[in-house]
Structure formats: C-alpha cells, structure tokens
Image (tube, rainbow, N blue to C red):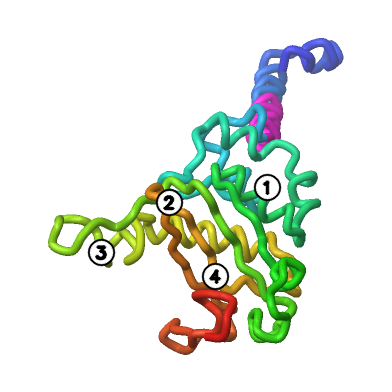
Amino acid sequence: AALDDEIWPRWARKPKFKTFLSVMGVTKDNAVRYMASAIKNRLSKVCADDALDAVAGNLYLERGEGRLRMGIEAWRAYLAGPFGRWATAGTNAGVVNQLAAFGLQAQVIAWIDLVNGGADPAVTFGGNSTFCYVQIDGSPFGPPGQWDGGAAWDNAPFTWDSNAQVAEVQLIARIIRRWLNGVMSCRFIKVQLTDGTYVYWPMWESWELNATGDGPEYYNQGYQTP
C-alpha cells in the first residue's frame, strides 16, 4: 500500500479514489503476507513447530511413535535435505540409516550374507535368495514381564513378547518396507531387548495375508526350514 502511494498519478489521489486504492493496497499486502507465510511454512528449517507434520507428509517422512518419536529439533534436522535421504532408498544402507535416525542400531542380513558366512544355501531361507531379515541391537524395548505380575503379556498397547508398543513395531516395519530394495523380502525382525535376549517379530508381504490379516508361517521366525 505504501508503494502504491508513490506510483499512482495525481488524479488518483482524490479522496474517494484514494480510499478505493488504499483498500486494494491492503488486500495486496495481505496476499503477499499469506504467500510469504505459506512459503516459510513449507521449509523445515524455518517453519512453525506445528507445521512440521505437514512438511513431513509432503516429503513422505515420519516423526516416529512412542519411545521412537523424535523431539522437535531432531525432527526438524531429520527433515532437512530430504532428497539426499531418499537417494538411499532401495538399499541396505537406506534401511540402516533411517532406523538409526530413530535411535536404532540395525543391520540387514540377506540370504547371500548368511551363505557367505557358511550357511547351506539350499537350506537357508529355503534357497530363496531374495529373503532377508533385519537385526536390531540395543533397542529401548524390555521384556514383557511375568504372568500374573501386573505386566503386559499380550495386553494392549504392548506386544506379547516385549514391552514394545504395537505402534512402535509398526513404525519399524514401515521403515523397513519403505526403504528396502524392492526385490527383497524381509521375513522377520530380530530385536535385542534391554536384558540382552532377542525376540522375533514376523513380517509378511501384503499378498501373503488373508482376509483377516493373518499370514502363514514361512521363515517368519528364523531362516532355517520352517
């Protein structure tokens, strides 16, 4: 509006017309402010905290769940440089790096890795060379407790073999499916609990599940003959 006052000719400065132009100027100023705000709130480094989820949705990235949920500053840093992050999609390093962002130390162990380590290629995953599993060491999840001890054996929101919440397990599974090489099939997740023991979380491809969401046992608890 202030710039308009310097642009319009003398005849446009009559009281009624000046009022009309002033309203137009305010409207344009508001439009510029809205556009500037919209641009700012699309950038993870400078957007408002409550805009980060919308920015992340546009980038197809997520903040995490439960104990794996990032704080605001970590979340903001995670969203910086998304194209460099997505450049690793479809690789083992991509899976490892994404899980590391949620504080998880992971490794992808494929059929070929097991065979190179001395496993029988015909027996390992039944000879399915595209099968793998993901091992997570030093997780924040603990054992589920004892029966009748007030702990969480199979009580929502916990899973039956650890105190990991269902949403946390689903997050890890989503990350693996999203970043793993498309020709590979992760059959299970091997997770180290806080007491040093390991639990196995089965993974299935969508086509393996029936109408009720159940899948058959097919190398979902180990890589030997099921």
Are the residues at dot 1 and dot 4 in contact (C-beta closer than 8 Å)?
no
Of badges 2 and 4, nearer the viewer stands 2
The location of residue 159, given as percent across then percent down, is 35, 63
Q: Amino acid at mark 1?
A: Asn
Q: Nearer the viewer, residue 138 or 32?
A: 138
How far is disc 2 from disc 3 in space, using C-alphas? Answer: 19 Å
Does residue 30 belong to the magenta stretch? yes
How far is disc 2 from disc 4 in space, using C-alphas? Answer: 18 Å
Q: Which residues are magenta?
A: 28-43
Q: Is residue 146 above or below residue 220?
A: above
Q: Residue at x 53, y 58 (%)?
A: 172
Compared across the picture, whether 88 is left or right of 57 comes to right
Would you name the residue on which mark 2 appears?
196
Label 3 Cα neighbours within 10 Å, binned few <14 / some 14-19 / many ≥20: some
Query: In what element is the residue under mark 3?
Result: loop
The disc, 2 or 3, on the residue closer to the chain's N-terminal end is 3
Rendered image quadrant of residue 29: top right
Q: Amino acid at mark 4?
A: Phe
Would you name the residue on which mark 4 appears?
188
Q: Amino acid at mark 3?
A: Trp
Residue 14 in view, yes or no: yes
Q: Amino acid at mark 2?
A: Gly
Q: Which mark is residue 97?
A: 1
The disc, 3 or 1, on the residue closer to the chain's N-terminal end is 1
Label 4 Cα neighbours within 10 Å, binned few <14 / some 14-19 / many ≥20: many
Of badges 1 and 4, nearer the viewer stands 4
Query: In what element is the residue under mark 1?
Result: helix
Are the residues at dot 2 and dot 4 in contact (C-beta closer than 8 Å)?
no
Q: Is residue 8 above or below residue 146?
A: above
